[in-house]
Amino acid sequence: MKKTIRFAFQKSFPILFGYVFMGFAFGVMLTELGYHPIWAFLISMLVYSGSLQFVMISLLSGGAALPTIGLMTLLVNFRHIFYGLSFLDKVKQWGKYTFYNIFALTDETYSVLCSCQFPEDVNEKKATFLIALFNHSYWIIGSLLGAVIGSAIPLNMKGVDFSMTALFIVIFIDQWRAFPNHLPAFTGLICAAVFLPIMGPDSFLVPALISTVLILMLLKRRIGKEAE
């Protein structure tokens, strides 16, 4: 169990810096609207969706109706449908951790789990749960710190969001080195490059994901043979 905990922490450690700083920014922005720090804690614990939480701040400040908030939630988190599809074969193995793992499957947690190579002396089911739990804890801690002390300290948070971009670049490089077949990576890059100028930076992700999934489904047999 100690090796499993150590492995999960090591894999989640790069997420710590990005989540604490981004959560901190969320906590500061929420308290600036007049909300008590306890709301930053509860939202980060129960909603736990980085980009949606920042959108939520705009919706709350504008007095948006519940149907509007629900629709925005669906649109912002629509990409998680594709994340879940790639883990369908693992859901059966998660057991009692299933519902929490589904809830805690953020972009960063998904990327880390996709690149994980679990050693034989590590319990994969528990390690998966702990990676998700550690990442969730980092976000909660960052949000609470930002709500409690961030609003009282004059800090310039501009540019902090690039830490998430840098993290994804590092994970992409690790996956590129770990897997000899680069066809999935090229497929994702090409689909993103095609839809980015057409749809714009705010709308290209969903069609790019759909196209990537469909293409990879068609090439599944070829990818499997090359992997073997």
Image (cartoon, helix red, strand yellow):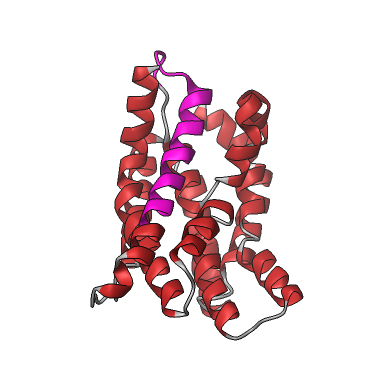
How would you classify the magenta stretch by its main secondary structure?
helix
Whether residue 77 is visible: yes
Magenta segment includes 124: yes
Q: Is residue 81 above or below residue 99?
A: below
In front here: 85 or 3? 3
Total labels drawn: 0
Whether residue 157 is visible: no
In front here: 185 or 56? 56
Residue at the spot x=45%, y=50% of the render? 108
**22 sits left or right of 87 in the view:** left
Residue at the spot x=34%, y=56% of the render? 20
Q: Position of residue 102 (x, y in %)?
A: 62, 42
In front here: 14 or 209? 14
Q: Is residue 9 above or below residue 170?
A: above
**198 sits left or right of 10 in the view:** right
Q: Position of residue 100 (x, y in %)?
A: 60, 39
What are the residue bounds of the magenta stretch? 119-142
Image quarter in which the N terminus is found: top left
Q: Position of residue 54 (x, y in %)?
A: 49, 71
**70 sits left or right of 34 in the view:** right
Magenta segment includes 182: no
Q: Quadrant of residue 79?
A: bottom right
Q: Position of residue 225 (x, y in %)?
A: 57, 29
Q: Quadrant of residue 96?
A: top right
Q: Is residue 155 above or below residue 11?
A: below
